[in-house]
Amino acid sequence: MSTLPQSLANPTRFMAFSAWVLPWLAAAACVLLTIGLYMSFTAPLDYQQGHAAKIMFVHVPTAWLSMFGYALVAFSSFGLLVFRHPLADVSAKAAAPIGAVFTLLCLLTGSLWGKPMWGAFWVWDPRLTSVLILFLLYIGLIALRSSIEDETLAAKLTAVLSLVGIVILPVIKFSVEWNSLHQPASVMRLGAPTIHPSLLWPLLVMAIAMSVLFLALYLKAMRNEVLRRRLKALHAHQVRASVELARQPAG
Amino acid sequence: MDLGPHAAYIWSAYAAVGIGLAVLIIWLVYDGRRQQRLIDELEARGVRRRSGQPECE
């Protein structure tokens, strides 16, 4: 009996499966985002930060997904280098720009939260700096891939870079304990969350909504990449056919 | 809706996320349609993939 990744190793089977699941994911993301936004704007005021704490409902999910996106790129890269899974490189290539956008949104919303709370849009704090490095890693992966014409070589080199760069994830996770201005973990921690349930529930709903949206975007990007490779194969086939036709003797 | 003295920061954060995700969605939909259109054009000209030819490396 094959696992889901094994059964989806065939791109044609993956395209059929993703075409079926994508509309459901998109619809679920729309419904959950609507509920999450309603809960965010009707949540009670934070006793210290007042309304500004509402930025948390978009900042924290984008931060979690920026790290999840990189873990996905690294996991896919491992699948390419070790198991040579046919869709591993498609997955790594698709996840990188989506992860980069979520990281950029995390940095932007963090700055917009930092100004009223800390008095500055940016400080060279361990957490902020490590997330900036994560964003630069994403940009580096995208730039490296696009700078190499040979797709097989580009896939292998970006896979190696992404596996080396995974060291940034524990650095981000533990950076709040290194004399950081950023508040420590209050949801994903040993022991119970330190956020009051009236603020925790909107945060969890927004996190689930954005995760479903991330998954939908990731599947769509993978579908686009499979189509791009199919198009490339068609072009190559067309060129080969033209060359064979030109070689045939006249008459 | 009164969001207090920091309303501009709150609205800006939500707007940034909305615009960022909207741009990403539009780009992905446009890219998918473009790839499909180019494939359809080639197939309309009689170019077909050989059966069993790998699509992904």
Image (tube, rainbow, N blue to C red):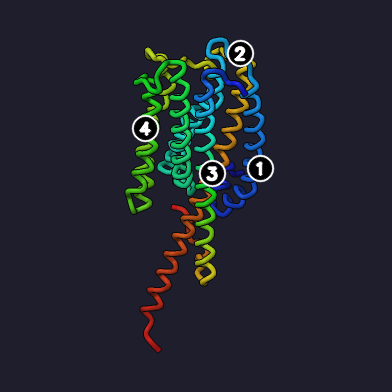
Neighbour class for label 4 at 10 Å: few (<14), some, many (≥20)?
A: some
Query: Residue drawn 47% across and 32% down?
Result: A105
Pick whichever, A39 or A27, lies toward us: A39
What chain does mark 3 sit on? B
The numbered dot on residue A196 is 2
Of marks 4 and 3, the one in the foreground: 3
Q: Quadrant of residue B44?
A: bottom right
Neighbour class for label 3 at 10 Å: few (<14), some, many (≥20)?
A: some
Q: Position of residue A67 (x, y in %)?
A: 46, 30
Q: CA distance from mark 3 to mark 2?
A: 33 Å
Query: Residue drawn 57% across and 13% down?
Result: A46
Q: Amino acid at mark 3?
A: Ile
Q: Position of residue B34 (x, y in %)?
A: 51, 57
Residue with the mark numbered 1? A24
Q: Position of residue A185 (x, y in %)?
A: 49, 17
What chain does mark 4 sit on? A
Looking at the figure, which quarter contains the C terminus of chain A? bottom left
Query: Residue drawn 37% across and 40% down?
Result: A141
Q: CA distance from mark 1 to mark 3?
A: 16 Å
Q: CA distance from mark 2 to mark 1?
A: 32 Å
Mark toward the start of the polypeptide (2 vs 1): 1
Query: Residue drawn 34% across and 21% down?
Result: A124
Pick whichever, B50 or B24, lies toward us: B24
Residue with the mark numbered 4? A165
Label 4: element kind? helix
Relative to residue A149, is residue A184 depicted above or below?
above
Of marks 4 and 1, the one in the foreground: 1
Q: Position of residue B40 (x, y in %)?
A: 54, 64
